[in-house]
Image (spheres, helix red, strand yellow):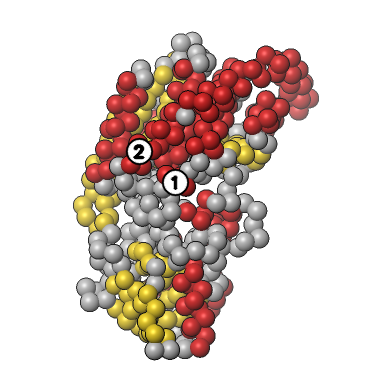
Amino acid sequence: MRYLVSVALTLFGFILHGQIENEAPVIKQIYTTALVENQGYEWLEKLCSKGSRLAGSKQATQAVLDFQKIADSLGFQTQLQAVTVPHWVRGPKEIAHYEFGNKKYYMRCTALGGSVATPSEGLKAELIEIKSFAQLDSIKDELKGKIAFYNIPMDPAFINTFFAYSNAVKQRYAGALEASKKGAIAVIIRSLSATENIYPHTGSMTYVGAKKKIPAMAISTADATLLSQHLKEDPQLLFEMRMACEWKDSVQSFNLIADLPGKEIPDEIILIGGHIDSWDLGTGAHDDGAGSIHSLEAAWLLQKLDLLPSRTLRVVFFMNEEFGLTGAKEYAKQTQIKQWNHVIAMESDAGGFSPRGISIVAPDSIIDKIKMLRPLLEPYGIHQFSQTGSGADISKIKSDDLVMVGFRPDNHRYFEIHHSALDNISAVNPRELELGSATLASLIYLLDKYNIIAK
Ligand SMILES: [Zn+2]
């Protein structure tokens, strides 16, 4: 069997090798069109000009409707898929401060998404600083009646900042849950930023399993560092915080599905998507406006250049990735009901920075074939072919015979802006965004043409 696989691979390599000279000008044309036309950046500007798209907000649903119109005008077959979305609102600007050495220090702060409010007059208590998850485990009664201050930086030693994020995100996601079990009355966390800055970063959190829901706030990394220094000199300093966020009734919103039916194999679907909802501090230009636009623009490029795949090309704008993936779950449910036959699923949800490569989830023989495409993509800086997952939204339709691809742009600036007020259109470079769309379009073209699918 192994011998047969290696013969097949050699044969594939041989065929592809012979074709590379023919394909290189096609790929060049895709990149050139993206860079010259700048269509994706124009769409992203339009998307961000309407403000943030917090799941459950009117703007999030309006963005879906606006882009349905655009897709309709381009000749896509569109449909809206109803999704139930939790609705949490931030309320008035949060306040946090403390006194140290006769001076009042105000924190740059934000409620975490989904947090309960403080009492209306706020709350005031001493802090216990937690510098590692091991320390948290060893805490017994010290947190009773106090505020837990998680100050666990993202580890700068990681080359891939997504790994640093994964290692540190527990303080945000489960910090309140764990601290409440030990009697804390609230938590503040050091923002998950890869570099030190003055911007607070929000993000999702959970109370699942908590007996008591306690308020959770993030402060900027610069403020967390300063607070930690002051605590060393005055461990009894009193921290005050006030937040008025609240949960409302769930609302109905939509995933947008936009198809360009395949002329030869219409019942096989190549899906490409991103999530259209964002956090509310910025306008979600990178997370994940860029990924949504990448998806639409990749399809538009192939359509414009008459390079559409033989299979149906489906663009999906998923609703509500940030508050629990309800859009992705609904899409997966409908996939079962409607027996949609996905053969390739691609996701862009790592920002609109310069493309570096892709991450692939597929059988080894498929991964080997995809890696053979490298000479065609290397001139555009695409050189990373890893196997580190694909994307959160498409993970819900994962199956053994689905080739899953996650777009991997340069990641060094992503967590500086992620979930903060810095995530707006001025943080997106038009050329970098366009290169991403062209990369995804090129991959769709090549995977389809050379039948690099697992079925
Ligand atoms: Zn995202």
Place of residue 342 in the rendered image (x, y in percent of width and height, measured from the top left):
47, 26
Q: Which mark is residue 426?
A: 1
Q: Secondary structure at mark 2?
A: helix
Place of residue 425 in the rendered image (x, y in percent of width and height, measured from the top left):
42, 44
Q: Is residue 111 left or right of residue 417?
A: left
Whether residue 404 is visible here, answered yes or no, is: no
Residue of label 2: 47
Q: Is residue 41 above or below residue 455?
A: below
- Numbered disc total: 2
The residue mark sitting in front, 1 or 2, is 1
Query: Of residues 319 and 58, which is closer to you in this image?
Result: 58
Please report the residue visible at 45 percent of the width from the left and 65 percent of the height from the top: 198
Q: Is residue 215 left or right of residue 408?
A: left
Place of residue 285 in the rendered image (x, y in percent of width and height, measured from the top left):
42, 44
Please report the residue visible at 27 percent of the width from the left and 32 percent of the height from the top: 65
Distance from mark 1 CB to nearest ligand 1 atom below 8 Å: no
Mark 1 or 2, nearer chain start: 2
Whether residue 152 is visible here, answered yes or no, is: yes
Q: Residues within 10 Å of mark 1 (few under 14, many from 20)?
A: few
Question: Which amino acid type is shown beneath numbered disc 2?
Answer: Leu
Q: Secondary structure at mark 1?
A: helix
Please report the residue visible at 74 percent of the width from the left and 18 percent of the height from the top: 17
Question: Which amino acid type is shown beneath numbered disc 1?
Answer: Ser
Q: Is residue 443 above or below residue 229?
A: above
Query: Of residues 348 and 306, which is closer to you in this image?
Result: 306
Q: Which mark is residue 296?
A: none
Please report the residue visible at 24 percent of the width from the left and 61 percent of the height from the top: 91
Place of residue 119 in the rendered image (x, y in percent of width and height, measured from the top left):
24, 74
